[in-house]
Amino acid sequence: GNSVTQMEGPVTLSEEAFLTINCTYTATGYPSLFWYVQYPGEGLQLLLKATKADDKGSNKGFEATYRKETTSFHLEKGSVQVSDSAVYFCALPKGNSGGSNYKLTFGKGTLLTVNP
Amino acid sequence: GAGVSQSPSNKVTEKGKDVELRCDPISGHTALYWYRQSLGQGLEFLIYFQGNSAPDKSGLPSDRFSAERTGGSVSTLTIQRTQQEDSAVYLCASSLARVTGDEQFFGPGTRLTVL
């Protein structure tokens, strides 16, 4: 099945610094790709997604581009804030067919801490 | 409307006891998922429901784990004879349909601690 490898961190940045969290995937075909975020004490929530190759997902100043050439979906933000401190997960469907395109497989998660 | 809710938020139990975890999905969501989040294993898929049926139980770690869903809504995950390695955060998610790219909405989770 499909799999994802994510930079594990932790990552500590100062406010207004540039953020990159690397994510690479192994997949058959071109499945949708996701970034989920988990704020302290809260559940996972979808941050952004891209449903086909070369798409760019964006939300809250975060961006990620679906790059089939490098099988990557790196998360970036130009200027992080203290409120961005959270755990970030890269994810994709475990399979592409046969009913396995619904369950997600996640990276290990990257803890981001942004200091004022 | 309300998001996905789970209860209890925390559960501490003794080894060997049975526990039940509850999930209330978003109204109208036909698909429901259980995942487990633990330090050593990250986020793991456990089971998926479409309506009341579970076409995929492949992620359940042992036969001590079972789940059911009634009325196409509430789901219960039951762990029998709990073991210390069952300690984790159990997450429930729901979505509208089984379409690739369809967003899964997660609940806050139940933190299970087995002493």
Image: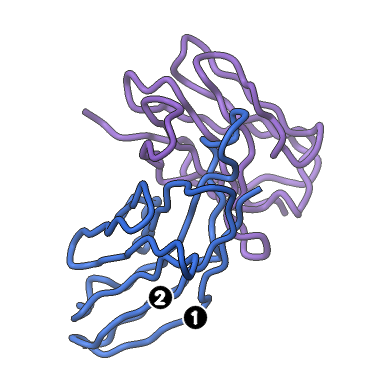
Chain colours: A blue, B purple
Choose mark 1 or mark 2, whichever is in front: 2
Q: Looking at the image, do the residues carrying marks 1 and 2 touch, with CB atoms under 8 Å apart?
A: yes
Q: Secondary structure at mark 2?
A: strand
Horizontal and vertical percent for residue B51? Answer: 50, 15
Residue A21: numbered disc: 2
Q: Residue furthest top?
A: B71
Horizontal and vertical percent for residue A98? Answer: 62, 29
Location of residue B67 by image quarter: top right
Alpha-carbon neighbours of circle 1 within 10 Å: few (<14), some, or many (≥20)?
some
Q: Which residue is the site of mark 1?
A: A9
Q: Secondary structure at mark 1?
A: loop
Task: Out of A112 and A47, give the one closest to the viewer.
Answer: A47
Position of A93 with respect to B12 (left or right) is left
Amino acid carrying label 2: it is Ile
Horizontal and vertical percent for residue A54? Answer: 33, 58
Distance from Cα at disc 1 to Cα at disc 2: 9 Å
Task: Specify which label sits upstream in the sequence, 1 or 2.
Answer: 1
Task: Out of A65 and B50, give the one closest to the viewer.
Answer: A65
Dot 1 falls on which chain?
A
Alpha-carbon neighbours of circle 2 within 10 Å: few (<14), some, or many (≥20)?
many
Say which residue appears at 22% left-offset and 71% top-offset: A83
Residue B55: numbered disc: none
Task: Out of B104 and A66, give the one closest to the viewer.
Answer: A66
Position of A75 with respect to A82 (left or right) is right
Amino acid carrying label 1: it is Gly
Location of residue B95 by image quarter: top left
Say which residue appears at 33% left-offset and 52% top-offset: A49
Is residue A10 positioned above or below A60 on the image?
below
Confirm whether circles 1 and 2 share one chain: yes
Quarter of the image with the C terminus of chain A is bottom left
